[in-house]
Amino acid sequence: MRAGIKNAIIAILKDYPNYEAYRRERELDLRYPAIEPDDNVGGGRTIREHDAKMINYIVSIESDKRLRALERQHKAVQYALYKADDDTRTIIEELYFKERPLYSVAGLVMSGKLKKILSERSAYRARNEFIEQVADNLGIKYL
């Protein structure tokens, strides 16, 4: 797998625990957009329609590309975690989901936290297969 693709998948994995906060923040950005100052100093009617805000909000939530990408990435990681065995889940959770990981791959193997994986090479292989599974779920072509 190319390094750029692998790094992108790792970035998605590191963002996975924060998905709900990112989604909530994006929905709030769409619900309450930045208000433009009104330059209509002399009076008169406002050009903006306040009733159309809710319709625009619903349409923007449904068609927002960033929100859809977040959901797609979340589901791809979630499905890969569902399919992974316990040791692979332990590796991924320790390396990417924790804010401050205590172990490296070698440390996980040496500490005995992994039940079936006994060698460092097997642990790296399981991690790489998980990353490839997430890439497959996202439809990313890798070589």
Image (cartoon, helix red, strand yellow):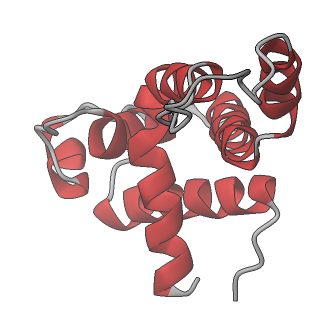
* Left or right: 5 as drawn, with respect to 55: left
Q: How many marks?
A: 0
* Left or right: 42 as drawn, with respect to 65: left
Which percent across, then down, holds residue 105?
A: 25, 54
Which percent across, then down, holds residue 68?
A: 76, 40
Q: Residue furthest front?
A: 42
The residue lying toward the viewer, choosing from 91 and 114, is 91
Which percent across, then down, holds residue 54?
A: 81, 13
The residue lying toward the viewer, choosing from 8 and 34, is 34
Residue at 44% over, 71% down = 7
Q: Is residue 49 above or below residue 62?
A: above
Residue at 68% over, 22% down = 44
* Left or right: 82 as drawn, with respect to 90: right
Residue at 42% over, 57% down = 11
Image quarter of the C terminus: bottom right
| Residue 141 position by quadrant | bottom right
Q: Is residue 63 above or below residue 1?
A: above
| Residue 124 position by quadrant | bottom left
Q: Is residue 112 above or below residue 110?
A: above
Residue at 76% over, 14% down = 50
Image quarter of the N terminus: bottom right
